[in-house]
Image (cartoon, helix red, strand yellow):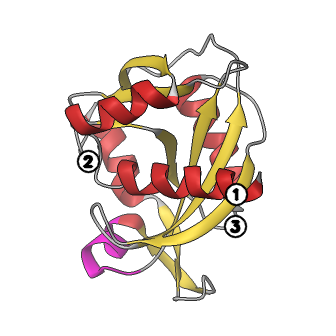
Amino acid sequence: MGSARVCFVDELVERVDCHDRVLGVVTRRQAVREGWLHRIATTVCRDGRGRILVHRRADHQSRFPGHYEVMAGGAVNVGESYEQAAARELAEELGIRCLPRLLFTVINRSGWSPHWLGVHEAVIPDAVVPDPDEIAWHDWLTESELHSALSRWRFTPDSQEVFNRYLAFRTARS
């Protein structure tokens, strides 16, 4: 368990500017400590019926243990695109192999440190195989159920904002 945390804090990421242009390579720990922008890729997962996958982070996680999330994701590694990172994270966290579709990017200042957030969407099968080191619980919720949960459960700081942006993006597209 301790080595997983070491991997997290020592992973290499690209430090980027306010226009999402690469400035250099740093450790994620350094980016967080210094408040430097770097990239995170997340995916809102829907099933064939339109329900949204919600999960609770494992209690031993170093960031937001036991908090619920609307998105699955993580840091974009050096040389990866947002889409590649999102696909890798889905495979690692949920056992799903697919190429999520990038919807938008936005600077996110909630959470541990500021970062560019690439928000994706993917329609995935109902049957996911979450990594128990990452995810303690998961379920599929309708949008109505999720709105209710967002006001009652303890979600990560960016879940509400990103979910609202996601819904606005979907509404604007239709």
Q: Is residue 26 left or right of residue 92?
A: left
Q: Which label lies toward us, 2 or 3?
A: 2
Q: Which mark is residue 63?
A: 2
Q: Which mark sits nearer the N-terminus, 2 or 3?
A: 2
Q: Which mark sits nearer the N-terminus, 1 or 2?
A: 2
Residue 101 x, y percent position in the rendering: 76, 49
Q: Kindly check if marks 2 and 3 are in contact, taking CB atoms under 8 A apart as contact.
A: no
Q: Which mark sits nearer the N-terminus, 1 or 3?
A: 3
**Residues under labels 2 and 3: Cα distance?**
24 Å
Residue 130 x, y percent position in the rendering: 50, 20
Give the crowd class for mark 1: few <14, some 14-19, many >=20 residues within 10 Å: few
The residue under the point 68% across, 18% down is 49
| Residue numbers of the magenta segment | 29-36
In this view, the residue in front, 138 or 132, is: 138
**Residues under labels 1 and 2: Cα distance?**
25 Å
* Residue occupied by mark 3: 79
Is residue 5 visible in this depiction of the protein?
yes
- For badge 3, the amino acid type reads Gly
Main SS of residues in magenta: helix
Secondary-structure class at tag 3? loop
Q: Which quadrant of the view contains residue 44?
A: top right
> In this rendering, is residue 13 above or below 75?
below
* Residue occupied by mark 1: 103
Q: Which quadrant of the view contains residue 47?
A: top right
Question: Would you say residue 68 sits in the magenta stretch?
Answer: no
**Residues under labels 1 and 3: Cα distance?**
20 Å
